[in-house]
């Protein structure tokens, strides 16, 4: 009788656990993640302050937050600050000065697995001379280093009203 009761409880537990996994996350999994990133943005239409070669590598720092909704989907706020001044050559051959632009993007994130994801979002680039709307498509690969800590390697492409940029970053992240 005890054996039969034990088997019934075990089957019930296994079914409950698989139902929770199918619905999304288990209760003890971390749902929030914060990342600090450092990287470079390549701006093809960028011209340096001293009018040097076209194309600029601009250093960036970022702070990202994401909230896991299910096993495969998250929502996030992605923020970057460009740490440089440069000019953009626009389509009508004029130059637009950019100084320490701040980018904030609300993104949807699809997780292929525990390490690799793709993100897409919409936001704004705020800068004192002129602000632009931004669409972003990106991907990142996460390498766990300790319990709830990891290193991420990311790449993103930003489409802006007057120019585009391609960014690469390395970040440290904490799940909580």
Image (cartoon, rainbow, N blue to C red):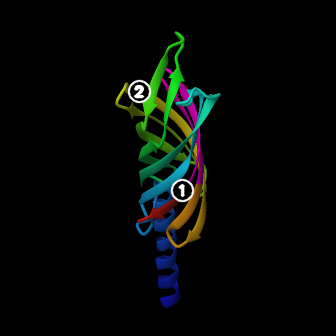
**Front in this rendered view, residue 127 or 5:** 127
171 relative to 156, above or below? below
Is 58 situated left or right of 131 in this image? Answer: right
Q: Read off the residue under disc 2.
A: 133
Q: Read off the residue under disc 1.
A: 171
Query: Which residue sits furthest right?
Result: 53
Examine the rendering and report whether any part of residue 68 can be seen: no
Dot 1 falls on a residue whose secondary structure is strand
Give coordinates of residue 132: x percent, y percent. Answer: 41, 26
Residue at coordinates 51% horizontally, 77% vertically from top-left?
A: 10
3 relative to 161, above or below? below
Magenta stretch mostly in which secondary structure?
Answer: strand
Give coordinates of residue 105: x percent, y percent. Answer: 41, 38
**Front in this rendered view, residue 13 or 123:** 123
Query: Which residue sits furthest top?
Result: 92
Q: CA distance from mark 1 to mark 2?
A: 25 Å
- Which quadrant is home to the C terminus? bottom left
Residue interval drawn in magenta:
153-170
Residue at coordinates 41% horizontally, 60% vertically from top-left?
A: 31
Examine the rendering and report whether any part of residue 7 can be seen: yes
Around disc 2, counting alpha carbons within 10 Å, would you say few (fewer than 14), some (14 to 19), or many (20 or more)?
some
């Amino acid at each position: 009788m005890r054996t039969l009761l034990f088997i019934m409880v075990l089957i019930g537990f296994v079914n409950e656990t698989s139902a929770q996994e199918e619905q999304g996350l288990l209760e003890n999994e971390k749902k929030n993640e914060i990342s600090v990133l450092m990287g470079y943005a390549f701006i093809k239409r960028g011209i340096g302050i001293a009018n040097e070669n076209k194309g600029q590598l601009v250093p960036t720092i970022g702070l990202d937050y994401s909230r896991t909704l299910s096993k495969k989907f998250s929502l996030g706020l992605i923020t970057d600050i460009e740490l440089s001044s440069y000019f953009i050559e626009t389509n009508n051959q004029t130059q637009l000065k950019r100084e320490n632009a701040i980018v904030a993007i609300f993104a949807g994130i699809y997780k292929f697995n525990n390490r690799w994801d793709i993100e897409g979002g919409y936001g704004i680039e705020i800068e004192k001379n002129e602000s632009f709307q931004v669409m972003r498509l990106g991907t990142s690969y996460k390498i766990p280093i300790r319990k709830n800590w990891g290193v991420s390697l990311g790449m993103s492409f930003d489409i802006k009203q007057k120019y585009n940029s391609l960014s690469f970053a390395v970040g440290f992240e904490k799940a909580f």
